[in-house]
């Protein structure tokens, strides 16, 4: 899509009233005949444009292509669209090697060679959302994993506006939540995945590609058994609006980027934290309870031998753990040693547990009575808290409290 048409789309979107042909021609420095040709091309692309003596006015947008995705997009990305690419990530890499300096969203209706992590095949028929963002962040390679987490959060936020409850499996899968329709009770069903690629020096990134694959308007029979689509759950969705929400949300999270805020948002949507997991890495297999993540995206797993920090690997959820009726006095390992009031802030759902100094006695009976009146945390399994000293709730202590069921 050329720059003149992009500017015309923006002018039509930004105007609350019809814009005359002469005014458009003057501002774009083209002839009125050229404006008419551009208007007709936009109509062919799916724009419903009224013409009146007062000028042109967009009344509806129905297509899924470069111009329609650009119309109303708030995120600062140039859109490059094709009906079909072998891989949007490959096309984004081609642009990067051509020294394209602006940030680009490469979008396709279908991919013939879509892939996920470890070069696994990714089914990408027509009807999905297949987009790769070519970015030029000013950061070191060590900081890049947080962009994957930001993309997962952006997808979750966008899909939730469709009325569908979804969650994130570490490191980069978006699943239907367990209480959504047609979901396996132990693992959920995969809706989206994220693949990032990069190039640069040891201390500086030249470019970053964030590829997002979201099963939108696809019949689930065309997908692998572990996957599902939005269409299978709620019916066909407006792909253009959904993609715009993903891009806008990602831009908000990363411009400027705040790793702490992104990781907090990821925790709030995580289905991995508090779960019994098996992580397979090239060197070993780790089993335990996923208790937290730390910058830039490592998973913290509590095993029988101690704590493991996992930076990369395949994650399998083994089973749900725990129940919400548990309280700390039921664990012999849980004993308060504080002499002052304490507030615990759940790392996952961010609810607060206020614990008085009277609850810190070593007596199990006293602790049981004290904890019995507390509101149960919404998170099952291992509960991980940030600990604060009341009343200075903004003063974080160095250690965290992990409650293992």
Image: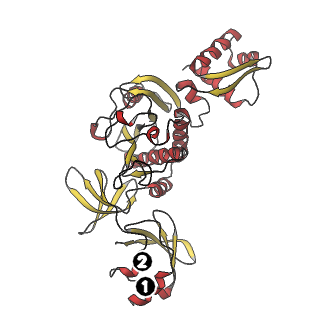
Name the element at disc 1.
Answer: helix
Residue lying furthest right in this view? Answer: 53
On the rendered structure, is 76 left or right of 270?
right
Mark 2 or 1, nearer chain start: 2
Percent position of residue 97, x then y: 38, 27
Q: Is residue 362 visible?
A: no
How far from the left and from the top, in percent, is residue 210? 42, 38
Provide the secondary structure element on which disc 2 rests: loop
- Residue at (40, 34) in percent of width and height: 219
Q: Position of residue 280 (x, y in %)?
A: 24, 52
Q: Residues within 10 Å of mark 2 (few under 14, many from 20)?
A: many
Other residues around mark 1 within 10 Å, as few (<14) / some (14–19) / many (≥20): some
> How many numbered markers are drawn?
2
* Position of 116 relative to 400 (above/below): above
Determine the residue positioned at 53% across, 38% down.
Answer: 242
Which quarter of the rendering shows the N terminus?
top right
What is the basis of the colouring in this image? Answer: secondary structure
Position in image of residue 129 (x %, y %): 45, 34
212 relative position to 162: left or right? left
Label number found at residue 206? none
Q: Quadrant of residue 147?
A: top left
Residue 160 in view:
yes
Which residue occupies the extreme left position in the image? 283
> Distance from label 2 to label 1 (Cα)?
8 Å
Q: Residue furthest top?
A: 33
127 in relation to 54, above or below:
below
* Quadrant occupied by the C terminus: bottom left
For the residues labelled 2 and 1, say whether their Cβ atoms are less than 8 Å apart.
yes
Disc 2: which residue = 327
- Relative depth, front residue between 393 and 153: 153
Residue 278, quarter of the rendered image: bottom left
Query: In the rendering, which numbered label is found on residue 368?
Result: 1
């Amino acid at each position: 899509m050329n720059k003149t048409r992009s500017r015309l789309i923006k002018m039509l979107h930004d105007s609350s009233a019809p814009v005359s042909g002469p005014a458009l021609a003057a501002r774009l420095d083209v002839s009125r005949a050229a404006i008419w040709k551009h208007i007709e091309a936009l109509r062919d692309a799916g724009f419903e444009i009224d013409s009146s003596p007062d000028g042109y006015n967009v009344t509806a947008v129905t297509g899924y292509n470069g111009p329609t995705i650009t119309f109303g997009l708030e995120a600062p990305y140039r859109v490059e669209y094709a009906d079909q690419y072998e891989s949007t990530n490959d096309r984004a890499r081609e642009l990067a090697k051509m020294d394209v300096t602006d940030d680009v969203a490469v979008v396709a209706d279908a991919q013939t060679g879509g892939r996920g992590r470890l070069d696994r095949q990714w089914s990408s028929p027509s009807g999905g959302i297949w987009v790769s963002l070519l970015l030029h962040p000013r950061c070191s390679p060590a900081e890049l994993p947080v962009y994957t987490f930001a993309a997962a959060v952006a997808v979750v936020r966008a899909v939730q506006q469709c009325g569908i409850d979804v969650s994130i499996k570490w490191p980069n899968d978006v699943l239907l939540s367990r209480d959504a329709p047609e979901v396996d009770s132990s693992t959920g069903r995969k809706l989206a995945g994220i693949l990032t690629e990069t190039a640069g020096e040891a201390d500086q990134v030249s470019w970053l590609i964030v590829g997002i694959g979201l099963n939108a308007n696809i019949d689930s029979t065309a997908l692998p058994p572990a996957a599902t689509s939005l269409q299978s759950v709620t019916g066909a969705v407006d792909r253009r609006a959904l993609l715009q929400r993903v891009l806008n949300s990602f831009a908000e999270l990363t411009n400027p980027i705040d790793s702490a805020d992104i990781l907090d948002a990821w925790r709030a949507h995580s289905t991995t934290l508090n779960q019994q997991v098996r992580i397979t890495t090239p060197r070993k297999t780790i089993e335990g309870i996923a208790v937290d993540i730390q910058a830039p995206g490592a998973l913290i797993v509590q095993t029988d031998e101690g704590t493991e920090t996992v930076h990369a690997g395949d994650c399998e959820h083994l089973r749900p753990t725990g129940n919400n009726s548990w309280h700390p006095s039921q664990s012999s390992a849980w004993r308060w040693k504080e002499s002052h009031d304490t507030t615990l802030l759940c790392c996952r759902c961010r609810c607060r547990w206020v614990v008085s100094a009277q609850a810190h006695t070593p007596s199990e009976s006293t602790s049981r009575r004290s904890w019995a009146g507390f509101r149960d945390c919404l998170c099952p399994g291992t509960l991980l808290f940030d600990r604060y000293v009341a009343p200075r709730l903004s003063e974080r202590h160095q250690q965290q409290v992990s409650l293992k069921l």
